[in-house]
Image: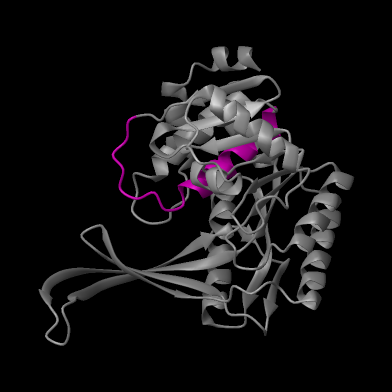
Amino acid sequence: MDFNQLFSAFTQLKVVVLGDVMLDSYLFGKVERISPEAPVPVVAVQRKEERIGGAGNVALNTAALGANTFIVSVVGNDDAGKQLTALYHQHHIQTPYLHVSPNRITTNKTRIISSNQQMMRLDEETTKDLLAEEEDTLLGLLERCIKEQQPQLLIFEDYNKGVLTERVIQRAIALCQAADIITTVDPKKKQFFSFKGVHLFKPNLKEVKEGLNLLETPSTPQELREVHAQLQQHLDHQISLITLSEKGVFYQFDSQSAIIPTHIRTIADVSGAGDTVIAVASMVFAVTANMPLAAEVANIAGGLVCEEVGTVAINKDKLLKECLALLPVAEILNES
């Protein structure tokens, strides 16, 4: 399989994204004076944008790569929820398994930006765990989605907003195991060790350090292999994929492991890069079962989205071009 075949194969995938969804709102403007009311800049707003954030950004990335993508989550019965659902439809993300709850508000993060610099962020959200009846509804929707769509891949995207409760996580993994669905996760601290039995676990280095209560930050291949072993004791998972910020990514699958350094980029904004990494790595692994290749392609994708301001999805054509230019596919295939 060459890269053109790989990217073509993405269109045959059915992907479910389960987790905390949110709306990312942006106010772009210019600062030319300080407020006379308080020592703060006055931002003259020039334009507004709404974008898909949170777990929806993972879905945005999988859809952008051509996968048939379904979002399973909870939104509030509010304007932000309606805007978010409309954006899903606009970007070909399917929403028949999206629950509208009267008990929650849709997470909406409003960023005020001037000269490509974020001045302030305003968060509107509910972070309480789902009520028991809401868990029942969400799990019923997931079960129906699995039965009706027969997906090959489920990605958990946790932002600690209360959708991925321990019960939801454990039941979802059991449903996927019974249906032979690959499961991958981008975790957060609260439920860090709740994803027992997933195939691929993708924390960042800070989350690993906090989750395992490490005093020192692991950096060498041997130290990161020891981290993988510690994570496996808790999770019994197959693959660790740890993002290392500007140093790239580390992966381990059975005896295979490596640190893959980043490619030189002009970084504008790291928002959403982790979403892109988990989306791309999960899809490549689902198609090829080749973890070295999945890590290499995801590493490139994460760097590409950091060149853009704000939360954006990966550009399929640009990613394909970069893979063809940067990756010796024959060598990677020989590693698998």
**Residue furthest to the front:** 215
SS majority, magenta: helix
**Figure quadrant of the N terminus:** top right
User: For the point 50% across and 61% down, which residue is it?
Assistant: 53
Q: Nearer the viewer, residue 12 or 276?
A: 276
Q: Which quarter of the rendering shows the C terminus? A: top right
- In reply to whether residue 276 is colored magenta, the answer given is yes
Q: Residue furthest bottom?
A: 37
What residue sits 89% from the left and 46% below the top? 178
> Which residue is at 64% across, 32% downward?
228
User: At which x and y percent is residue 251?
Assistant: 58, 29
Q: Residue at x 62, y 74 (%)?
A: 75
What colour scheme does the image use? one colour
Q: Nearer the viewer, residue 188 or 313?
A: 188
Q: Which residues are magenta?
A: 264-288
- Image position of 250 with respect to 41: above or below: above
Say if 87 sits above or below 321 in the image.
below
Residue 210 sits above or below residue 219 on the image: below
**Count of numbered labels shown in the rendering:** 0
**Is residue 58 in the magenta section?**
no
Q: Position of residue 284 (x, y in %)?
A: 62, 33
In-image side of 135 versus 89 (left or right): right
Q: Is residue 5 visible?
A: no
Asked whether, in this view, residue 36 is left or right of residue 293, the answer is left
Q: Quadrant of residue 303?
A: top left
Is residue 250 at all visible to an observer of this figure? Answer: yes
* Relative to 142, residue 321 above or below: above
In the figure, is residue 303 to the left or right of 170?
Answer: left
Q: Quadrant of residue 181?
A: top right
> Horizontal and vertical percent for residue 188?
59, 54
Asked whether, in this view, residue 280 is left or right of residue 234, the answer is left
Instruction: Name the residue nearer the viewer: 106 or 256.
Output: 256
